[in-house]
Amino acid sequence: MNKILKYFPNLTDRQKEQFAALPALYEDWNSKINVISRKDMDNFMEHHVLHSLAIAKVQPFKPMAEILDVGTGGGFPGIPLAIMFPETRFHLVDSIGKKIKVVTDVAQQLDLKNVRAEQIRAEQIKGEYDFVVSRAVTELSEFTKWVRGKLSPSHYHDLKNGILYLKGGDLEAELAPFAKKIQTWDISQFYEESFFETKKVIYLPFK
């Protein structure tokens, strides 16, 4: 929890309780289903929770905004963001049923009434969202095909509606097709831990 409070000092008592409960919930699920790699559980709050919250540093979500988390896996970045923005609506989707089972249970255990989890392929989703978030599920060019037509044309955040994508490594070739409209933030400008040195938040606005 100390790392979360270091970068997000203004959490409510309820948010502190919810973030503090996450490690035990995922430890329990990890003993049944390999949701997160075993070695990564030792750095769970940094590698998964804090990483997910980098999106909050780039664009805080407004009440009643609709956010789609595609390929959420065990609930990242969606679950930490849903704790951070309790009045924002989150739709967490994944094609793998056992992962959605984990997300559903975690959301229920934390009493996150702003989370809806669904086993579905991204291409099959109906509806429009203010932002689509995700964490390195595929190359961005492929990801944009999955979520085409799912962004609302009505904008009311500082950033225009679009994709907020967490990814690391050498992204030059992958991002080249989007060079004229993409924005990136080095996560190391928000957090000092070495884990974040090569990681970025990528933003691609609504066409």
Image (cartoon, rainbow, N blue to C red):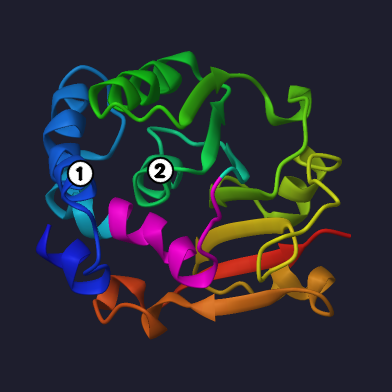
Task: Please state which amino acid type lies under the numbered disc 2.
Answer: Pro
| Relative to 73, 180 lies left or right | right
Residue 195 picture quarter? bottom left
Residue 188 counted in the magenta span: no
Task: Please state which amino acid type lies under the numbered disc 1.
Answer: Arg
Foreground residue, 109 or 102?
109
Q: Give the residue at mark 2.
A: 86
Q: Compare marks 1 and 2 and give the one earlier in the sequence.
A: 1
Q: Vertically, is 156 above or below 44?
A: below
Q: For the point 45% across and 42% down, which residue is it?
A: 78
Q: For the point 38% across and 16% down, which residue is it?
A: 101
Residue 140 picture quarter? bottom right
> Which region is colored magenta?
48-63
Q: Main SS of the magenta segment?
A: helix
Q: Vertically, is 84 above or below 105?
A: below
Q: Do the residues labelled 1 and 2 touch (CB within 8 Å)?
A: yes
| Relative to 5, 80 lies left or right | right
Q: Vertically, is 94 above or below 180?
A: above
* SS for dot 2: loop
Q: x, y (%) of residue 134?
A: 55, 48
Q: For the point 22% across and 54% down, which residue is it?
A: 12
* Picture disc at residue 14: 1
| Relative to 42, 131 lies left or right | right
Q: How many marks?
A: 2
Foreground residue, 27 or 117?
117
